């Protein structure tokens, strides 16, 4: 699968629990299925994606899904001082995260970066609407 940002082949990384991440060794972005991501979040004492918070930004142009070639939807969260966002594909349920994974990262490193991302992401103001995934 090609990176939605750099359009180069991403590296498949499979964790011990069979979670599969596709990681771009150029930009450090990661692609993960939303069902696998939900399992990962719940195992790390975080809420699932639907309870994570965030809001859809339909005005921001996102990348295209590497599986379906449809426009990804930007979901924004975090706080005003440190906004965070991820991209979601409505067709396949894939999630694109810019986590800064280093070249050669293993599954444990990618998982830790994703958990850190969502810990920052969930710091959402009380009036933010929940994103549907």
Image (cartoon, rainbow, N blue to C red):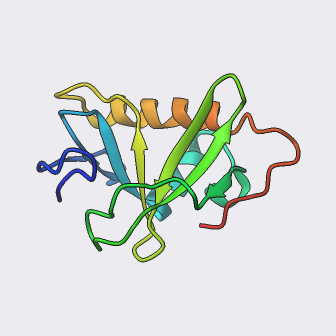
Where, quadrant-wise, is the N terminus in this rendering? Answer: bottom left
Q: Is residue 105 above or below residue 74?
A: above
- Closer to the camera in the image, 50 or 106: 50
Say left or right for 49 vs 100. right
Identify the residue at the far front of this view. Answer: 59
Instruction: Tell me: 11 left or right of 98.
Output: left
User: Could you tell me which quadrant the C terminus lies in?
Assistant: bottom right
**Residue 85 percent across, percent down from the top left:** 55, 43
User: Number of numbered discs present?
Assistant: 0
* Picture coordinates of residue 52, whole percent (x, y): 69, 50
Location of residue 46 by image quarter: top right
Residue lying at 50% horizontally and 47% vertically, measured from the top left: 86
Q: Quadrant of residue 58?
A: bottom right
Residue in the foreground of this view, choosing between 96 and 40: 96
Q: Is residue 48 visible?
A: no
Residue under the point 29% across and 74% down: 68
Residue 124 percent across, percent down from the top left:
76, 39
| Residue located farthest toward the left when viewing the structure as drawn | 9
**70 is higher (above) or lower (below) than 105:** below
Which residue occupies 26% across, 69% down? 67
Q: In the image, residue 88 lies at what x, y percent?
A: 48, 60
Using the image, determine if residue 33 lies above or below residue 107: below
Q: Is residue 79 left or right of residue 2?
A: right
Which residue appears at 49% of the width and 64% of the height?
35
Can residue 1 be seen at all in this image of the molecule? yes
Q: Nearest the camera: 108 or 98?
A: 98
Residue 96 lies left or right of residue 14; in this view the side is right
Residue extending farthest to the bottom is 91
Quarter of the view holding residue 6: top left
């Amino acid at each position: 699968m090609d990176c939605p940002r750099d359009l180069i082949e991403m590296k498949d990384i499979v964790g011990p629990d069979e979670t599969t991440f596709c990681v771009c060794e150029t930009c450090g972005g990661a692609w993960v299925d939303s069902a696998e991501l939900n399992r990962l979040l719940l195992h790390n004492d975080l809420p699932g994606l639907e309870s994570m918070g965030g809001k859809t930004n339909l005005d921001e142009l996102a990348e295209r899904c590497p599986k379906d070639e449809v426009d990804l939807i930007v979901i924004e969260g975090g706080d005003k001082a440190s906004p965070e966002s991820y991209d979601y594909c409505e067709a396949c349920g894939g999630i694109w995260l810019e986590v800064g994974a280093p070249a050669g990262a293993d599954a444990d490193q990618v998982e830790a970066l994703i958990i850190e991302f969502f810990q920052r992401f969930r710091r959402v103001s009380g009036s933010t609407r929940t994103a549907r995934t």
